[in-house]
Amino acid sequence: GDVYKRQILTLIFIMGEAVIEVFIPAITKDLINEIQYGGADMNKIIKHGLMLVLMAALSLMCGGIAAVTCAKASAGFSRNVRHDMFHKIQDFSFENIDKFSSTSLVTRMTTDVTYAQMAFMMVIRIAVRAPMLLIFSVIMAFREGKDLAMTFVVVIPILGFGLFMVARKAMPAFRRVFKKYDRLNESIEENVRGMRVVKGFSRQEYEKEKFNNAAEDICRDFTKAERIVALNTPIMQLCMHFNLIFILLIGSKVIITSGGTELGLGSISMMLTYGMQVLMQLMMISSIYVMPVSYTHLTLPTTS
């Protein structure tokens, strides 16, 4: 019960944080436009400044509370999963025990549940916040930035497709890694249980070689997966700099030609902030797409 209450609280505070973060750039835009040409009303500047401080404090508070409730919810989730798995294993028939090795069952209850806890934490924290910030940022950008928001029509599909392809290639590699943990744990368990036999027959070098092969196998697959995921950064940088060039180029031209009547410096600052928010949230969505889906192998097969 506590897990679900904390999960709901996390979602509420995450949504509060997302809403506040979307409105902060719009208020910053008004503040910059107020002081753009000098001689601004000090009362308005103080008003906007205090509003920004208040919203930043509220956003920090919501984020901090959400982090605490999320940590407690995910830890409680993993505790419940381990509890249920342990009791389920106790009910296994001898046929089930023979089907699932003890090494596999230990891995399911330790390493895999930890990964499931991480995935659960990402889902309740990021899976709500990232889409909300993405959608609200785009809406606010089109509402406040006018033609400058057209950059998202180009950037979002390109970055979204690129991140989707990276995630699609990385998932099989991550799944292979997680399955090979069993071999590594099996080597450790056999050595611990049969230490006397290993030493008695001088099999230390053979067992070391066996462990090294399993570790190297995991290392190769993990390195391959991480290399694929590392492509996220250059794709993100490409889209970010395109967004930056487009906004500064078009925005500067509009300001100069209109004399600042159609567009102000505050609008350019706001669009740059929204652009970063949109790109970062797409990155977050990509990460939560890769990790939780990669952990689908954790579920124990149906027992007879």
Image (cartoon, helix red, strand yellow):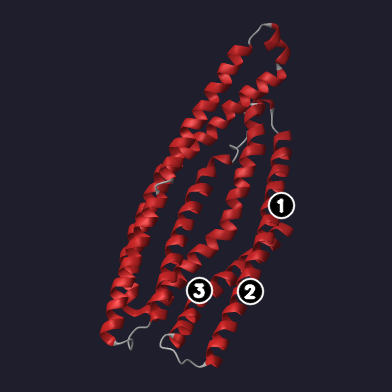
Depicted 28 relative to depicted 204: above or below: below
Mark 2 or mark 3, which is nearer the start of the sequence?
3
Tag 3 near tag 2, CB within 8 Å? no
Can residue 266 be seen here? The reply is yes
On residue 116, the disc is none
Cα separation between marks 3 and 2? 14 Å
Of circles 2 and 1, the one toward us is 2
Q: Which mark is residue 22?
A: 3
Residue 265 placement: quadrant:
bottom left
Q: Residue furthest front?
A: 38
Mark 3 residue crowding within 10 angstroms, few (<14) / some (14–19) / many (20+): many
Dot 2 and dot 1 residues touching (CB under 8 Å): no
Quarter occupied by the C terminus: top right
Between residue 206 and residue 80, name the one nearer to us: 206
Disc number placed over residue 76 in the picture, else none:
1
Residue 221, x across and y down, in percent: 47, 33
Which residue is at a point 58% across and 60% down the rendered structure image?
A: 125
